[in-house]
Amino acid sequence: MPDPSTEEDKRENSKNIDLKETAIREFRVAQRLRMLWILASLIVALLLGAATVAGLWQSYPVPFSYVGLFAGALSTAFAAREIIIRRPNLARLKYELIVLQNEQTNLAAQSAADPVTALRIYRVASRADVSRYSRAAARNRRVHNTFQGIIIVGSIAVTSLTSAGSAIGGSRWLGAGLAAAVSISAGFTGYFKYRERSFNQQQTADAIAKESKAVELGIGDYGGKEEDALRQFALKVEELKEEQRKKELQLEQTSNPRDASQT
């Protein structure tokens, strides 16, 4: 019989590895957002600076030019600071992941071989996979809906302000700001593909939950012996998870055409 403490350590280690991998993925997404932030801020600062130097806004009060220029430069500096400060965290997360993976190897070497027990543990652990995919799907769905709301409301507001013309004071600046928000939201939605990620993750979560319920009840393809049913369940779940990883990789390659062309 396997040592219960060793099996518990293995489960805890696997959980920590999943959490660390998730943290690394989220950190990389956050870094990409910060890069887009710094690029947008830099573009704004350069445009406002050029307009100020060229004197294109002579018909408007001078403070507007300099306040906008200062805000763009400050945003650029702050975004650059965030990227530089947080970059070492990625190396730390990767190192901690390697340590956990080495620990997982050592635990596997210490445990006695018991396929049925391992398969039972795998079936129970699959519930955590369902929860993880469901949470990720809900998070991406919220982000997508937020950006879509900004696009819809912003587009309507920009159209209304354009129709009103200069009748409303400050409508030009407000319209420009809303148009920028709509463009940025559309860019984020198209680049990161939150809706597709949410759909794929929820689909995988539902599929694993369905297989887990079937093997628990011993129905469908899992009506035979327990060991055979658990082994078939593990193969099916691994197939679903591998398919999900391929979908995520495909979305990443679509978001990065240069990487896609090299593969």
Image (spheres, rainbow, N blue to C red):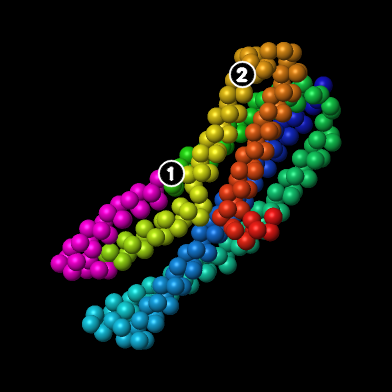
- On screen, residue 102 versus residue 140, left or right, reads right
Q: Is residue 227 visible?
A: yes
Badge 2 vs badge 1, beta-carbon distance below 8 Å? no
Q: Which residue is mark 2?
A: 214
Disc 1 on helix, strand or loop?
helix
Q: Is residue 154 magenta?
A: yes
Q: Quadrant of the N terminus?
A: top right
- Name the residue rendered at 35%, 86% in the picture: 54
Per the picture, the main secondary structure of the magenta-coloured stretch is helix
Q: Which residue is mark 1?
A: 142
The image quadrant that residue 59 belongs to is: bottom left
Q: Work out whether 176 lies above or below 112.
A: below
Q: Work out whether 155 lies above or below 62.
A: above
- Name the residue rendered at 24%, 80% in the picture: 60
Q: Is residue 19 visible?
A: no
Question: Residue 191: x, y in percent?
Answer: 51, 55
The image quadrant that residue 246 belongs to is: top right
Q: Quadrant of the C terminus?
A: bottom right
- The kind of residue tagged 2 is Ala
